[in-house]
Image (cartoon, rainbow, N blue to C red):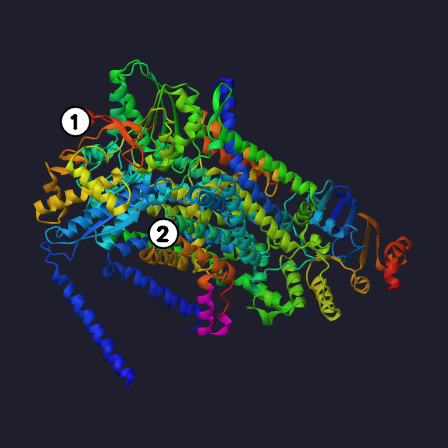
Amino acid sequence: MPELLRVEGLAKHFGALRAVDGVDLVLPEGRRTALIGPNGAGKTTLINLVTGGLPPDAGRVFLRGAEITRLPVHRRVRLGLTRSFQIMNIFPRATTLENLLIPVLARLRRTHRPWAGLGTERAAVAEAEALLVELGLAGFRDLPAAALSHGDQRLLELGIAVASQPALCFLDEPSAGLNPIERGTVMELIRRLSESRRTTFVIVEHDMDVVFSLADWIVVMNRGRVLAEGPPAEIRAHPEVRETYLGEELEA
Amino acid sequence: MSATRLEAWLCGAAALALVLLPLVAGRYPIYLAMQILILAVFALGFNLLFGYTGLLSFGQAGFFAVGAYVCALILLRVPSLLLGLVGGVAAAGVTALVLGALSVRHTRIYFSMLTLAFGMMLYSIALRWRDVTGGDDGLVGIPRAPLGPPGIPGPSLATIERYYYVVLVVALVAVVVMRRLVRSPLGLTLQGIRDSESRVAFTGVPVRVYRLAAFTIAGVYAGLAGALLPALENTVTPPIAHWSTSADPVLATLLGGIRAFWGPVLGAFLFFVIKDIIVRYTEYWLIWLGAIVVVLVLGFRGGVGAMLGTLLGRLTQPASGRAEGPR
Amino acid sequence: MTPDQLAYQGLVGLSLAMYLWLLSAGLTIIFGVLGVLNFAHGSLFMLGGYLAYTAYGLWGWPFWAAVALSLAGVGLVGLVMERGFLKRLYGVEEAYQLLLTFGFILILDDAVKIVWGGVFKIPPIPRFLDGAWPLFGRPFPVYNTFIIAVGVAVAAGLWLLFEKTWWGRMVRATASDREMAGAIGVRVPRVFAGVFVLGSMLAALGGALGTPVRVVAPGIGAAMIIQAFIITVIGGLGNLRGAFVGSLIVGVLSAYGTALFPVFELFLIYVIMAVVLLVRPQGLFGGHA
Amino acid sequence: MRTSSRLVRLSLAALLVAGLVWAAPASAQCQLGVPGIKIGVQGVSSGSHADYGRQIMMGATMAIEEVNAKGGILGCKLEMKFMDDENKPAVGVKNARYLVTEWGAHFMYGTDSSGVAMALGPVLQELKRIHFFTHAATHRLTEELVAQKGIQEIVRVSVPVYQDAVTAALIFKDRPEIKRWATIGADYEYGYVTWNLFKETLKKYRPDAEFVAAAWAPFLTLDFSPHISAVMAQKPDAILATPWSGEAVMLLRQALIQGVFDQVQVWWQAMGGSVDVLEGIASEVQRDRFKGKLWATARGLHNWPDTPENKAFVERFQQRWGRLPNYSAETTYSAILITKAAVEKAQSLETKQVIEALRGMKIMTPAGERVFRNEDHQFVYTVPAGRVVWDAKYPIPVLGDLKVFQAKDYYRHPPFAPVAATK
């Protein structure tokens, strides 16, 4: 599998706290990866560093071999790198369709057009509508996103992320605050999307069952470092991982 | 009848009424109508920035003044309103572009303070650069020059009624353009930025550039409104650059409704009507305006526009009852 | 200008700065704790002036008593503003808080017109503050000296209040983290009210002490508030120490400006404000409130 | 039953009212074919200069009451509307438009600030109405806008800046010990032209005079201390100050406590003779804090000229308002008397005819005989300047030790050589 993302010695300190402390990582294309670790392990910070939300103190980031360490967020997105957020991040006042229209238009480089009415953006609208169907939200096309249920909003956010048709997409706890059933739907959707599209997903998730069923590669972080990585079985067996992290999970 | 149809009818009626106004109304109502139209243009631009992009600027008067002063300086030399308008708008646009590039580095209160500083900077220039701006006494005796470009005078605008139609046409065009703009991909994206900057950034949009675009357009609208002023008042003075002038579009928009496209226009109308009506009964009209502001901020942040919007919604199908959130 | 003259002009600037300090101190405290930028703060300054004028100039109260009355009166107005209105807007976009307080400017400006009329008011100078004493070879007003003293005293007082008293610590806790403060048992609403009243009183003090040498008239509040904004921005929004230094900068600068570069004085002050916002948005003393 | 009877009573009342309304116009036999002559008045009536507007309004009201009591003008009653121009040109222009095009004013009066006047002048041509300026003092209003640009609708009843500038020079040219002059100036038209005209005139008589410092204060200045200390740093012998009304009071207070009156020989306070300033500094004058060094001008004085007209005017004014009249009250009062004379002569309200009727007019007013100068529509009359003194006869200080120059000696005369209107 060709290399998609390469991270070399990435580090970020907040005062004394070493949130991310020299992480090296290689993500090949098409491998569904789960990023796990206890709270404060540095998962979200790592995502921020890679996707451009935060400038790193040290280290370099490459996407398909090209360095993107200092690129602004929107440039990285255009190279095929995007993310979703742990805290719900959608456009509450816009309609469900418009929520997807923004990323689609952005991908088509049409967001700057000041004159044409949205109705005339047929290609974009069609694509967004198709995605709505894929998300199972077609029924709410013209409702303000705020009116959707929490679970549907999660689906919508997922939709916004994939609407930019990224090569690599980080999903930061995509099922946060959902009940088991809703969680199931979200994970199912992720599985479907990753099969129907050429998008490689990296998922931060706490529910181990989900992780082990969904991911074909697992990266374990602790105290800002990569503790271990490998296929689920390997990780399950990994002694350090067991004691520092999985231990209590399994007992629980 | 759908909400949009109804809206279209209302707009048509309003436009027609404005066209016919000079036939029925005296010179003062016409003068007042021009003031309203000018403020409406001013406020429309402001609301693109505040209502649609989420940036509260307290420096718009600066661009309003640039438009007014440059237009006035041109009219005092070249008898061509067209040139004056174009010059004023261009100058305001460039100023907004430059100051905007700096301002959009911040959001929220810091943005407000920064725009306040820039606006007052322009004010202090108007006040102190006497050789050009006339200082505290301003520029006076500005002629209401003929419309046409220099050389080809075109229709005379000596009478206020004629100039009224110039202002009306400009204002209508400005409204139509803004209407299209907010419903375009750009408009949608700006609203996205207002609601979630990070989300928009992660769809691959350079947020700051788009903020700058909104800021510049708002500046152009302010400049356009300002450029219409000299030929109406025959005088341009520093107070129009002062921050308290920046408050006019804020108040108008607040009155009419920040969340509704027609808010600024409606608000401009209300602003002057309230002022003019109250002034007839008491010299203390500010206290009333202030009270209205307090009530609106506490009770009806949607402004009168939202009230009407919901009303429209009731009149028509529920699906169109989405008055909240500019569309 | 000779060194003496420069020093003298600087001293004059210092007295200007102290009025600004009294005005911006309150503004800063309120922003630091409530996160509200009170547009109407200058109008409270004006109201303080009117109340002092009424008690001292019209009813012939002793100057001190008049000042005390104006503090009490304006404090009360502040209480009403915060408890009655502002508190309903916590949690809403700050834009609306700005707009609300802007509404107060309009109301107060007309209210004083209705009560005191449009004509400026100026009571006689209290005898014990009249006259001058030699400084740098020229007579320097006792009054300006007095204002400088008051300003410094207030600065010291506030420092003690926030560093040394229990209430001060409570306020600082609230400023740094509302929820946390509430969690450890601070009555946040009370702190908010108290801080707003304190801030209003500081504004009133400036206005009241100003009346005998500066007129009080409708609109002076709106005229002064922007200077207060400049100062709070230069010093860092919510930063008291910064506000003090900011006042000194603006006051002294405008004094020298008047004497040496009158044309650029005003412009320069706004340039400084903008530059600080761009280069150090947290203010010259930014970081901690 | 009851309701019906109430209906009857109501309708009767309505009829009665209707009858009155219908009868009203018939009762006044106005020979000019209008229900009444509308007098639009503007002045600043808010902020530090607000007393001027009030006094303008008082003067106008009193004149109108008196004229109406004597049957109005050619049987036409006068009615007034007063508006606050806030000293802002834009507001002044807006007011004028409202007064003429909406309210229907036949004549306009007042205006304090030179800035407002210069903005208003050109608009008058479009409005086709005469505006009697009763305070604004820049010479450019009459010299440029009337004499050169030919705007006929401008008429000035009050003394222009000549008095503040030229009389000062004429008085102090004879004080050889006063060489070094400085100004604390109003940072706008009025302040500049006063200072420039003063320098120009004094130089003619006193080549040795030096002008050592100038500090300029815009409207809404609250603290003049830096301006005062800035000019005092240059050790002037005398100071010419042009901030007026409330700002003059502030300025003088702040100059006092900076000990200025121990250092200078003369403080020339333009328009310091207006009653609001005199009231504001009364206690200081009474205690002679100014050491007799404070000189001032006014556009008219309640204690000069010693004529029956002036005495009667001041008396009636005090009865009516319980205050001494300021000159802005006198000039506005006289402007309305002038209007009466002109309209009666023209037998018309037409702007053109009324202006025609003003030509060559000589008329007795409280401030003395005013003569209309055709070239620049400036009424010429004599007002002395003087020293601010305490006179037990009056509740407030007055101008005493009066220096009377005939108007012709301190007015500028056409053709006018331009005076710079910049710093």
> Where in the figure is residue D259, as x and y percent of width and height?
43, 24
| Residue that mark 2 sits on | B38
| Residue D306 visible here | yes
Can you tell which quarter of the image residue D375 is in?
top left
Q: Which residues are magenta?
A: B306-320
Q: Is residue D392 left or right of residue B115?
A: left
| Residue that mark 1 sits on | D408
* Numbered marks: total: 2
**Quick one: B10 or C80, which is closer to the camera?**
C80
Q: Is residue D202 left or right of residue C121?
A: left
**Quick one: D240 or C66, which is closer to the camera?**
C66
For residue D343, the mark is none
Kindly report which numbered mark, 1 or 2, lies closer to the viewer in this rendering.
Answer: 1
Distance between mark 1 and mark 2 Cα atoms = 48 Å
Q: Quadrant of the N terminus of chain B?
A: bottom left
> Where in the figure is residue D112, as x and y percent of width and height?
29, 39
Magenta span main SS: helix
Q: Is residue D385 above or below residue D347?
A: above
What residue is rendered at 53% in x and 32% in y?
Answer: C146
> Where in the figure is residue D299, as x and y percent of width and height?
24, 34
Callout 2: SS: helix
Q: Amino acid at mark 1?
A: Lys
> Where in the figure is residue D47, as x and y percent of width and height?
38, 43
| Residue C252 visible here | no
Callout 1: SS: helix
